[in-house]
Amino acid sequence: QLQLVESGGGLVQPGGSLRLSCAASGFTSDYYAMGWFRQAPGKEREGVACISRSGSTNYVDSVKGRITISRDNAKNTVYLQMNILKPEDTAVYYCAAKDTGRSSTWCSRGAEYDYWGQGTQVTVSS
């Protein structure tokens, strides 16, 4: 059973940076797409970014230029580097994984993922 554990959340001032990590264990395939999602109080869950097995990425418009998703396949870890943080980035952030069969290029910011982490809180406030 694949397990995902997020870390790196916290309180940061506007304009600051955080790096979230998601460590995965229990892979049964070499082909997993990874995604980062967030959910703010009273709002629907939003796909922030995704990355394919081969490193192709996709971002929601509101974070382009500020947030970067990356992965280290040797360490089974995906990262979300968040810079120039804004109060509207405040949310619980979740990482997710999906077995893509043998596709190394697929990723999606939709909710088609099979496995989810428990979430880490990010609060941007002065």
Image: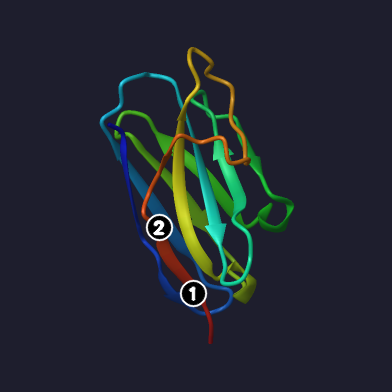
Give how far across and how far down residue 87 sits, in percent: 61, 76
Q: Which mark is residue 115?
A: none
Mark 1 crowd level (few <14, some 14–19, many ≥20, 10 Å Cα): many
Can you say whether 25 is above or below 36 in the image?
Answer: above
Residue at far bottom of view: 126
Q: Residue at x 58, y 54 (%)?
A: 67
Distance of label 2 from label 1 (alpha carbons): 13 Å
Q: Which mark is residue 123?
A: 1
Give how far across and how far down residue 96 sits, in percent: 45, 42
Q: Residue at x 54, y 51 (%)?
A: 37
Can you say whether 25 is above or below 22 in the image?
Answer: above
Tell which tag, 2 or 1, sits nearer the viewer. 2
Q: Residue at x 44, y 20 (%)?
A: 31
Query: Helix, strand, or loop for circle 1?
Result: strand
Give how far across and how far down residue 73 sits, in percent: 37, 29
Question: What's the amino acid at mark 1?
Answer: Thr
Q: On the picture, is 105 further left or further right than 72?
A: right
Circle 2 is placed at which residue position?
A: 119
Question: What's the amino acid at mark 2?
Answer: Gly
Which of the two residues, 61 or 74, is positioned nearer the viewer here? Answer: 61
Can you say whether 3 is above or below 62 in the image?
Answer: above
Which of the two residues, 19 or 101, is positioned nearer the viewer here? Answer: 101
Quarter of the image with the N terminus is top left
Q: On the picture, is 27 further left or further right than 54?
A: left
Residue at far top of view: 102
User: Quarter-wise, where is residue 66 in the image?
Assistant: bottom right
Q: Residue at x 40, y 65 (%)?
A: 9
